[in-house]
């Protein structure tokens, strides 16, 4: 597996939630120009190979994000959702993350190995501070209702998985799958919600972008509550 992409590549000195929550404007971090330039320098045929993107007749790339369709226009540098339900915070942040995912994905296939957030980067606890993963919120909301979790996961394009009271695998970007597993509360133990990442993810997606993406996904799981 190739070396992980530097974790500081996407959001240096700024937090993805820094923009006002009431805004509907797309969030473009200060590194955006770097990624547009890298997109322009990448041979177009690579995108179909690495992230399943298709070039339409207007010169725009069409890409799947979860079960939504997104369009990326290199000429105008605009990224828009063309199908899927409105989700304000998700829709504000996904354009930049989609750009990053297209630029950073490599032709390497994902390994069939899954690991916890803490073990994804050996010797480094990345997911803390501003990048803490909000798993407790999901456990609280679905503490006694595995069926509700299954329903919302299915609505977002999640594929059911075994190994918990309810679980789903979300193909957020082509090289960024995320597994979510929920154990509901019982007489002995409180509810528990855990995440698993594909071991190969750091070769295709920066670590801070992964944390941002994961928390946005968690927000989608909770958006009806």
Image (cartoon, rainbow, N blue to C red):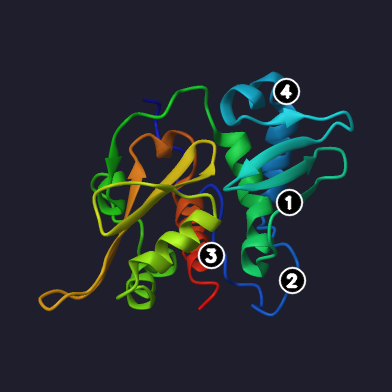
Q: Read off the residue under disc 4.
A: 44
Q: Identify the residue at horizontal 54%, vertical 55% (top origin).
A: 156
Mark 3 vs mark 4: in front: 3
Q: Earlier in the sequence, mark 1 or mark 4?
A: 4
Q: Which mark is drawn over residue 83? A: 1
**Left or right, residue 5 beside residue 17:** left
Q: Quadrant of residue 165?
A: bottom left
Q: Evaluate if marks 3 and 4 touch, with contact meaning CB atoms under 8 Å apart.
A: no
Q: Read off the residue under disc 3.
A: 220
Q: Position of residue 174 (x, y in %)?
A: 54, 36
Q: Read off the residue under disc 2.
A: 24
Work out how far the residue at label 2 is from the one at label 1, CA to CA, in angstroms: 17 Å
Q: Is residue 92 visible?
A: yes
Q: Identify the residue at horizontal 53%, vertical 62% (top origin).
A: 216
Residue 133 higher or lower than 23, as above or below: above
Q: Position of residue 41 (x, y in %)?
A: 72, 27
Mark 3 vs mark 2: in front: 3
Q: Identify the residue at horizontal 31%, vertical 52% (top origin).
A: 117
Could you tell me which secondary element the residue under label 1 belongs to? strand
């Amino acid at each position: 597996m190739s070396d992980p992409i530097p974790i500081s590549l996407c959001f240096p000195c700024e937090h993805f939630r820094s923009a006002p929550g009431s805004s509907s404007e797309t969030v473009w971090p200060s590194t955006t120009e770097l990624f547009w330039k890298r997109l322009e320098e990448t041979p177009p045929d690579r995108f179909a190979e690495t992230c399943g993107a298709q070039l339409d007749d207007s010169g725009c790339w069409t890409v799947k994000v979860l079960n939504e369709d997104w369009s990326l226009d290199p000429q105008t540098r605009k990224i828009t959702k063309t199908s899927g339900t409105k989700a304000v915070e998700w829709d504000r942040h996904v354009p930049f993350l989609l750009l990053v995912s297209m630029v950073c994905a490599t032709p390497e296939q994902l390994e069939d190995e899954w690991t916890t957030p803490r073990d994804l980067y050996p010797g480094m606890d990345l997911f803390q501070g501003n990048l803490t993963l909000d798993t407790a919120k999901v456990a609280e909301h679905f503490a006694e209702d595995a069926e509700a979790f299954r329903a919302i996961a299915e609505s977002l394009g999640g594929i059911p998985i075994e190994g918990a009271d309810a679980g789903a695998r979300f193909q957020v970007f082509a090289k960024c799958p995320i597994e979510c597993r929920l154990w509901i509360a019982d007489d002995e133990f409180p509810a528990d919600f855990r995440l698993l990442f594909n071991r190969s993810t750091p070769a295709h997606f920066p670590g801070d972008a992964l944390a941002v993406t994961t928390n946005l996904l968690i927000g989608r799981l909770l958006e009806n509550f």
